[in-house]
Amino acid sequence: MSGLSSETTLHVGGASPYDVVIGRGIAGKLPAILGDKVQRVAFLYAAELAELAQPVMDVLRDDYDVLALGLPSGEQTKTADVIFECWEALGEAGFTRSDAVVTFGGGATTDAGGFVAASWLRGVRVVHVPTTLLAMVDAAVGGKTGINTSAGKNLVGAFHEPAGVLVDLDTLLTLPTEELISGFGEVVKCGFIADPEILRLIEADPSAATDPTGEVLPELVQRAIQVKIDVVVDDLKETGGAGSHPGREALNYGHTMAHAIERAEGFTMRHGEAVAIGCVFVAELARLTGHIDDALAARHAETFGAVGLPVSYDNASFEDLLAAMRVDKKSRGNTLRFVVLDEVGSPVVLEGPTEYQLRAAYDVMTGKAAS
C-alpha cells in the first residue's frame, strides 16, 4: 500500500496528547484507548449505521456497560434538542466523570457526540470512530465540537480533544459514492493550504485517488490528517500562528463562503461540496486582491472538479450569502476575514475585502462573470 503500512499511528502532541490509528478492522483497539478505569460507555452512533456499528458495539460490551444512543442523520443531529436528549439519557444512566463517550459516524455525529462529551460534567473522555472520509480527515481530529443554530453553523460548541481516534479504512467501502467524493472537499483543501503532494497524487490520476479499494486513497487520508495535526498542535484554540501564518484558521480555507452556502441550503448540501465551491470563491478573491495568479486560481476549479465536486453555485443571492458570511465565527466585528493563499502551502489572512471584490468573486463562483 503506497505510503501506508497495514496500520499507521499518527501522534497528536500538545497539552492533551492522543493517537490517531489508521488501518482496517481496528475496532478491537477501543478498550486499550478507553482504559480499564472506565465502567460505562455511551455509544453515540448514526442510527442509519446500526448494522455497521454492531461489531463495534460488541467489542465495547465485552468490557463495559454500554448505553447505545442512535442519533438522527447528518446535520439533523446537531441541534440543542438532540443534545438535551443525550444529556437526559446520561443522567438517567448515572454517568460519572470517569465514564466515557464513543462516537461512530460521520462529521455531524462526531461534532454532536464530541459536544455531549465536552459538556457532560464539564468534560468526559471521548473516542471518535469516524466512518466517512470527511470525518476522518476533518471532524474527528482537533477537538472542535459544535451544533448549529438558526443563525449559522457550529456557532455553539467547545474545544474538547479526544482520547483517541480510530480511522477504519474499511468503512469507506460502505460509503455511497457521493459521500466519499464529498470528503475530498477537505482533502483537496489540505493540499492547497499545506501539502502539494496531495494535489499531485489527485491530479495524476483522479480515478485512482477516489478508489476506496486502491492504494492512493489511504495515503491521501494519512497526509490530510497529518496536515490537520500539524496545525492544531501549534494552535488548538485558533488564537493565531507564528509570523504571517494564520494557524488553525488556515483549516477554514474556503469555509466562510461554504458555511454561508450551507445555511442558504438549509444544511442539506454536503459539507465537502460546499467547501469545494467556497475554495473556488476564495481563490478568485485572492486573485482579485493580488495574492495569486490566474493559473493557481484556475487550478482550484480544475482539481476539485477532477474528483467530481461542484465548483459553482448560483442558488442564493450575493446579498443573502454576504449576510450569512457576516455572522461567520472568523469575522471580527463588521470586518470579514478570509483565509487566502500567497501560493500553494502559504495561507494568509485577508481582512476587509471591498464589496466590489466580493461581488466579482461571487460572479465567478456563479458562472456569471464576463468571459
Image: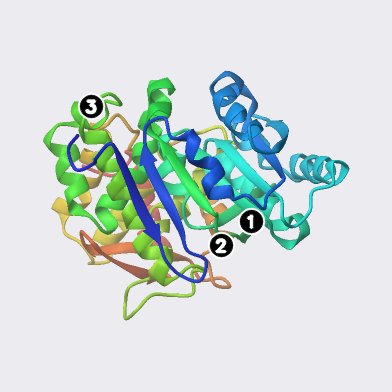
**Mark 3–mark 2 contact, CB under 8 Å?**
no
Q: Which x, y percent locates residue 169?
A: 37, 32
| Mark closest to the chain's N terminus, 3 or 2 | 3
Q: Can residue 153 be spotted in the picture?
A: no
| Mark closest to the chain's N terminus, 2 or 1 | 1
User: How many residues crowd mark 2 within 10 Å: few (<14), some (14–19), many (20+)?
Assistant: some
Q: Can you tell which of label 3 and label 2 is closer to the viewer?
A: 3
- Which residue is located at x 66 percent, y 31 percent? 61
**Mark 2–mark 1 contact, CB under 8 Å?**
yes
**Mark 1–mark 3 contact, CB under 8 Å?**
no
What is the three-letter code of the residue carrying label 2? Lys
- Which residue is located at x 54 percent, y 72 percent? 332
Secondary structure state at the residue bearing disc 2: loop
Q: Can you tell which of label 1 and label 3 is closer to the viewer?
A: 3
Q: CA distance from mark 2 to mark 1?
A: 7 Å
Q: Which mark is residue 329?
A: 2
- Which residue is located at x 52 percent, y 46 percent? 32
Image: 34 above or below 68: below
Secondary structure state at the residue bearing disc 3: loop
Q: Residue furthest top?
A: 51
Judge left or right: residue 309 versus residue 334.
left
* Residue identifier under label 3: 214
- Which residue is located at x 17 percent, y 38 percent? 2
Q: CA distance from mark 1 to mark 3?
A: 37 Å
* Residue identifier under label 1: 155
Q: Which x, y percent locates residue 222?
A: 30, 46
Instruction: Please name whichever residue, 84 or 318, is drawn nearer the observer in this view of the structure.
Output: 84
Q: Which x, y percent locates residue 328?
A: 55, 59
